[in-house]
Amino acid sequence: MAHDLLLRNARLPDGRTADVAVDGHAIAALDATGADAARELAAEGGLLAPGFVDCHVHLDKAYIADELPDNESGTLGEAIANIHDRKREYTVEDVRERAGRAIEAHVRNGCTRIRTHVDVDTIGGLTPLRGVVEAREAWADVVDVQVVAFPQEGVVQDPGTAELLADALEEGADAVGGMPANERSDADTREHVDACLDIATEYGVPVDMHVDETDDPTARSLEYLAAEAIDRGVEDVTAGHTCALAAYDDAHAARVVDLLAEAGVNMVTNPPTNLLLQGRHDGHPKRRGITRVDELREAGLTVAAGQDCIRDGFYPYGRASMLETALLTAHAAHLQTPAERRVAWEMVGANAARVMDVDYGLEEGAPATFNVFPPSVETPTDALREGVAPRYVLHEGSVVAENEVRSAVVA
């Protein structure tokens, strides 16, 4: 039988080598020895693994770092303030171009499923959203992009934003975000959560909020979000960052983790950014700045990791590399043993796919969305150690990137 594409001598995650066949958008066979195909690729024993997934990034802000005032304090608050003027100057074309560059970098690094948060507020209006939606359409053949309408400036303290969130859903956003800690009072924080949940329920879309991205041990947005999700019966809820959870005393943290488990909230940690921003003004010992990955996992919650920022006002680095994100997560969350290294890999793979609710895996009939690494990479641990881009990147059966040079991940 002739297939559309045949990958010769690929090393599967279980260590076997096999010829893998693809027909159309799907994997046709994981052992196609003796078959032929219209096109063949030589894996030469390199690892074949499902494609990476970035479930938390900001495409609208990508690559603006060098245009902004220096963040002298290195804090989240100053980063938000510094972006205001640049956001007022956004054009759809500007956002589309930068988002497209970030999408291309993701794809070349083996990531073709992306969830991006996009600012929706009275400063930039819907311009960031429209630019990202246009970039999504331009790259639709090689990447799947979900858009979260993100009220970074607040909802209560930025009147008109709630209406803009609804407009954003009408214009192509897939989910409602939130940043409840960026309000003036605890009452306003709760109103922020309520407003976002109301809109998400009305439109029948997921909720994906930035929650308690602070070192403040008194922050309580996370437990309120979880409790409201339970009371309202809202099931598709994701909480990103949740840095304050690490600052709670252990007894209170345990109660919040139990509440999150009852609510079934997906958790996303963002070590690239939060290792840099959080704990900066602590004495020693300094906070690590990320959430309680180990305790959340032990409670049975889905825990994923996201790139978050790519050369913007919050994070001057960022390569759109989920390998780098996984490696930073492994360091920050003490993922060292063989089993823990698999967890680091899953946090930018299977777990991130569950957050986005997209198909993921290597089995017959699954989408042919996978990466083929150079022959020196035989295991996920090898990939983490070497940090090289895949040789071939496939998305739904099409080869969307080829990286001939075995160098570090692209910028």
Image: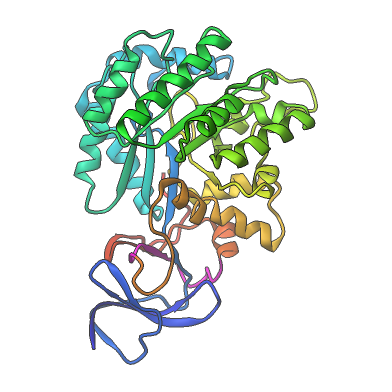
Identify whether 386 is placed above or below 223: below
Asked whether 166 or 314 is in front, the reply is 166
Quadrant of res 288: top right
Query: Left or right of 240: which side holds 340?
Result: right
Tell me: 125 left or right of 229.
left
In the image, residue 285 sits, relative to residue 87, either above or below, namely below
Which is the main secondary structure of the residues drawn in magenta? loop
Give how far across and how far down residue 18 sits, in percent.
43, 82
Q: Residue at x 40, y 61 (%)?
A: 405
Specify the quadrant of the image occupied by residue 32: bottom left
Q: Is residue 118 visible?
A: no
Q: Nearer the viewer, residue 147 or 38?
A: 147
The answer to which of 254 and 362 lies nearer the viewer is 254
For residue 347, say whether it is visible: yes
Say whether residue 63 is left or right of residue 239: left
Query: In the picture provided, is 122 more to the left or to the right than 276?
Result: left
Residue under the image location 54 percent in, 46 percent down:
304
What segment is highlighted magenta in the picture? 367-379
Does 111 lie within the magenta span? no
Q: Position of residue 82 (x, y in %)?
A: 44, 14
Question: Which of the colour schemes (rainbow, by chain, secondary structure, one colour) is used?
Answer: rainbow
Q: Total label count?
A: 0
Query: For the view shown, which residue lies furthest in the bottom direction?
Result: 34
| Residue nearest the viewer, comparing 102 with 376 | 102
Instruction: State which quarter of the image contains the C terminus.
Output: top left
Instruction: Identify the residue at horizontal 58%, vertical 11% (top origin).
Output: 186
Q: Position of residue 335 (x, y in %)?
A: 68, 52
Could you tell me residue 313's position as x and y percent? 45, 23
Q: For residue 406, which quarter of the picture?
A: bottom left
Quarter of the image with the N terminus is: bottom left
